[in-house]
Image: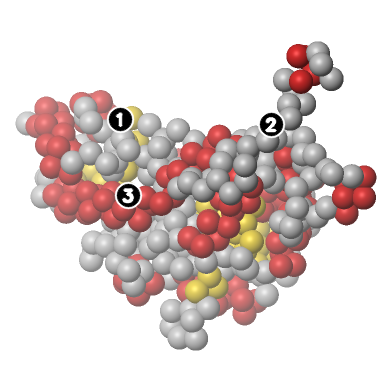
Amino acid sequence: MSDPATTLIHHPYLPPEGFMAPQVGVFKASTVFFPNVAAMGSTQWKDKTGYTYGLHGTPTTYTLEERLCALEGGLQCLLVPSGLAAIATALMSLLRTGDELLIPENAYGPAKELARSELAAWGIGHRFYDPMDPQDLARNIGPNTKLVLLEAPGSVTLEFPDLPEQVRICNGKGVLCVLDNTWGAGIAFSPFDLSPCAQTALAVDLTVHALTKYPSGGGDTLMGSIMTRDPALHQRLQLTHMHLGLAVGANDAESVLRSLPSIYLRYAAQDRSARQLAAWCRQAPQIAQVLHPALADSPGHAHWKSLCHSGACAGLFSLVFTPQTSLAQVHAFCDALKLFKLGYSWGGPVSLVVPYDIASMRSVWPAHLARGTLVRFSTGLEAADDLQADLAQAMQRVFF
Ligand SMILES: *Cc1c(COP(=O)(O)O)cnc(C)c1O
């Protein structure tokens, strides 16, 4: 083995073991070596006792999974390439032809589209339920209902449902409940809270989480997780995950691992800014309604208050402009913002704004929402006073 082409690959030097540093290494691999054929046949990856192939896990991805479990209170976690892939994988794994899925009216839009397209084509039915009326959820659960999607709050309209009651209804009827936990992120409330206090006990069967938002925190990484505390459910999800060949890149996993230690600080900072701005916007005459779960008159405020003992909220709020405000004026207002950028997503360093057409998103206009154009804001990590000045200058420019 004297040819350099060989020795630069099969090099005798091995770095010493025991390297310790704040961050986990970026282990990149498709191929993983086995010491012998016996090990090749016996190594297990499903319980994380070994490594077999990059697709099935590396020290980097195993570590991220375990730290996310610590964040959300789950026992098993699977990583997928996006938040939407987490929703899709969970639904594809747990639903079969003839089954029915229930989706809240205010659900993340692409999840509704998935139900209307692929799931419908595979013979999986769906119905939409009113997230603010648990009895409507109960009424919609039929003999074929296998799974209920939950989201708290709605990611655009921010109304907060009675989540514990919704989960009680699902448990009582024996249907799985899957919470999109992107807003709470494991910080605002505990989705797997098994506390004996019946009033607040909340134990969803699984969570899906767009790690793209808070866990990444950078506006630069797409990733999702599927988490549970039920070994049988996890095994089923794990098999689907394997059959579909889903995995995440090591560099992306590392970027989420690097951001995770600051997630509580970022969540709190964006929460503070969003509250300041939401409160400030209430005085604007063009605003008919300010949606933010911590505002006493925001839909579902009492549910938020009783569930989120920490008092925390994600850094999101929405404004409904008065019907007298034209669509062109609302768009001009969004265009006039300088620090708030027009763009999807949230949880990153840059504040973002998106106008939404609620009429096209709902079958009926919800009674708890004022009529008018809705604009959703997500606060980044800029100084709140600068963001407030940005809102003020854009309003000044368009409305005065
Ligand atoms: C962003 C988001 C998703 C999807 O996440 P991606 O990583 O963008 O696919 C799903 N649910 C909610 C509530 C989200 O905000």
Q: Earlier in the sequence, mark 3 or mark 2?
A: 2
Q: Nearer the viewer, residue 194 or 275?
A: 194
Q: Is residue 119 left or right of residue 264?
A: right
The kind of residue on which mark 3 rests is: Arg
Q: Nearer the viewer, residue 317 or 142?
A: 317
Q: How many marks?
A: 3
Q: Secondary structure at mark 1?
A: strand
The kind of residue on which mark 2 rests is: Tyr
Q: Earlier in the sequence, mark 1 or mark 3?
A: 3
The kind of residue on which mark 1 rests is: Lys
Q: Secondary structure at mark 2?
A: loop
Q: Residue furthest left?
A: 400
Q: According to the image, what is the colour scheme of the structure?
A: secondary structure
Picture layout, residue 259 above or below residue 98: above
Q: Residue placed at 63% from the left, 51% from the top?
A: 62
Question: Could you say which disc has been placed on residue 341 in the image?
Answer: 1
Q: Is mark 1 within 8 Å of ligand 1?
A: no
Picture layout, residue 175 above or below residue 293: below
Q: Quadrant of the N terminus?
A: top right
**Label 3 neighbour load within 10 Å: few <14, some 14-19, many 20+:** many
Q: Where is mark 2, residue-wise?
A: 13
Q: Where is mark 3, residue-wise?
A: 266
Q: Earlier in the sequence, mark 1 or mark 2?
A: 2
Q: Nearer the viewer, residue 299 or 387?
A: 387
Q: CA distance from mark 1 to mark 3?
A: 19 Å
- Between circles 1 and 3, the one closer to the viewer is 3
**Label 1 neighbour load within 10 Å: few <14, some 14-19, many 20+:** some
